[in-house]
Image (cartoon, helix red, strand yellow):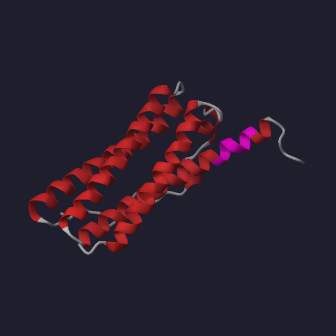
Amino acid sequence: MDKSNTLTILKNAFLIERKGKSLYEKAMDHAKDEVVKAFFKDLADDEQEHMNILEKQFKAYMKSGKFMAGGFENDGGAVTAPDILDETLKDKINAAGFEATAITAAISFEEKAVKMYGQRAQEATDPEEKKMYHWLSVWEKTHLKKLMALEASLIESVWHDNNFWPF
């Protein structure tokens, strides 16, 4: 792939991470409960880490035309949703509140990131680029699992609280 396209992909990846971080920070600032604040802070911190990685890779690629080795061999973000969601968090988020709306919006960001990173991991010819995008894809899948499990729980809670269940 030509250098221009690779740089464009890196820029777009950075922008997705930056938007996600901004959304998580806004949700964190809006949250009144410390458990909810901590949840969004963890997500924002992850996005900042991803931005730092992408920035370093952008600089390395601009300088040498190659991605630098970055230790992307592990799938550190590969955690299943039930391991990271607890009842305290679910109970603190109002299904009709700002935090729930932020979760729905974040799902869209994370889906886009997973798709872009997964596709790039398959297309990349540079082994380090391939590893990095695979690593990012796994992290974003983890975020997506967290958010989707939380959203499903909130929907179920609304249905239960409003007696929408037919049985």
Res. 75 visible in picture? no
Is residue 155 part of the magenta span, yes or no? yes
Which residue appears at 59% of the width and 37% of the height?
A: 100
Q: Residue at x 10, y 64 (%)?
A: 64
28 versus 49 height, above or below: above
Residue 50: percent from left, percent from top: 32, 50
Quick check: is 167 in the magenta stretch?
Answer: no
Foreground of the two, 89 or 107: 107
* Left or right of 65, for residue 74: right
Q: On the image, which quarter does residue 117 sit in?
A: bottom left
Residue 93 screen position, x and y as percent: 61, 34
Residue at the extreme top of the image, as rendered? 32
Q: Nearer the viewer, residue 153 or 75?
A: 153
- Residue 87 in view, yes or no: yes
Q: Tell me: residue 114, above or below residue 143.
A: below
Report the side of 6 relative to 166 (left or right).
Answer: left
Q: What secondary structure characterizes most of the magenta part?
A: helix
Q: Magenta stretch?
A: 152-158
> Looking at the image, how many numbered discs can be counted on the residues?
0
Position of 74 compared to 161: left or right? left
* Vertical comparison of 135 with 124: above or below: above
- The residue most toward the right is 167
Q: Closer to the camera, 163 or 38? A: 163
The N terminus, quarter of image: bottom left
Relative to 95, residue 77 above or below: below
- Residue most extreme to the bottom: 125
Where residue 24 appears, as percent x and y from the top left, is 44, 38
Q: How far across and down, in percent of the image, does residue 14 sit?
A: 30, 50
Residue at 38 percent of width and 42 percent of height: 19
**In the image shown, does 63 or 4 lie closer to the viewer?**
4
